[in-house]
Image (tube, rainbow, N blue to C red):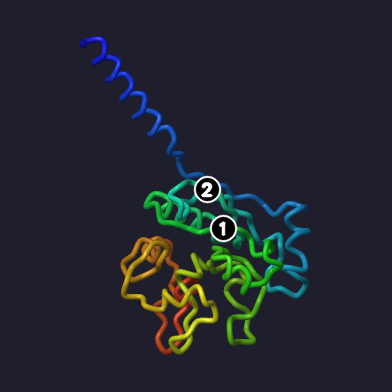
Amino acid sequence: MKRIGCLALVAAALVAGTASASTPSFRGAVSVIGPATKARMTGRSWHPGCPVSIAQLRLLTLSYWGFDNGPHTGRLVVNADVAGAVVSAFHRLYDARFPIRRMQPVDDYGGSDFRSIEADNTSSFNCRAATGSTHWSEHAYGHAIDVDPIENPYVDGGQTSHAASRPYLDRSLHRPGMAYPGGVLVRSFAAIGWGWGGSWSGSIHDYQHFSTSGR
């Protein structure tokens, strides 16, 4: 019985050690845009005439937790002047195990904001006008990020353009992936001085949108 008891203790210790070792630490890397990524961006998320050059942008490789409760690695393109702050925000989200569906540059969707949203993709840089405007979006400067856009829709007059987002028009029920006042997603970006589109006044609320200017 003593031997069996000892073996049980050893097995328990090994399981505990394995569980701890299987949870990887957050990793956030910042790199310049290489030739292959530049070629993929050109004609999709970036084109001549954009307000920033590709040399002003950086590729972030970030750890995040998925809705499957497992660790994943994603990529974002942001302006070089906010790269460190963005890594810090996603480090906070990772530590809190905030779930993110996927994280890929919008080039993987042909530069289409609509298609990226339909895939519930968290993304940043995209050289485009702001929704409903002729002015550059903060995304065109690499100064904005849309997080879990299905769970956090762009809402105009109580409506959304994405059918999968309709259950999330009710913001009173806090479900995984959602942004709400006091929640970890809003707090993580507030910690780096970014504003949130969910706090806009009027009939338009962009719950997915975080940016340096808040717009």
Q: Is residue 60 above or below residue 192?
A: above
Of 8 and 127, the residue lying toward us: 8
Q: Residue at x 36, y 28 (%)?
A: 15
Q: Which mark is residue 103?
A: 1
Q: Position of residue 157 (x, y in %)?
A: 45, 89
Of the image marks 2 and 1, the number of the one nearer the N terminus: 2
Would you say 194 lies left or right of 128 here?
left
Other-residue count near label 2 (Cα within 10 Å), few / some / many at <14 / 14–19 / ≥20: some
- Looking at the image, the residue that sits furthest to the left is 1
Give the SS element for disc 2.
strand
Q: Is residue 37 above or below residue 163?
A: above
Residue type at the position of mark 2: His
Q: Residue at x 73, y 68 (%)?
A: 44
Give the SS element for disc 1.
strand
Would you say 200 lies left or right of 139 here?
left
Residue type at the position of mark 1: Met
Q: Position of residue 114 (x, y in %)?
A: 62, 74
Q: Position of residue 5 (x, y in %)?
A: 23, 16
Of 82 and 65, the residue lying toward us: 65
Would you say 160 lies left or right of 111 here?
left
Real-space Cα separation, disc 2 to disc 1, in angstroms: 9 Å
Other-residue count near label 1 (Cα within 10 Å), few / some / many at <14 / 14–19 / ≥20: many
Would you say 60 lies left or right of 171 here?
right
Q: Which mark is residue 28?
A: none
Picture quarter with the N terminus: top left
Q: Are marks 2 and 1 in contact (CB under 8 Å)?
A: yes
- Looking at the image, the residue that sits furthest to the front is 1
Q: Residue at x 37, y 28 (%)?
A: 17
Q: Residue at x 31, y 18 (%)?
A: 10
Q: Which mark is residue 72?
A: 2
Q: Position of residue 139 (x, y in %)?
A: 59, 71
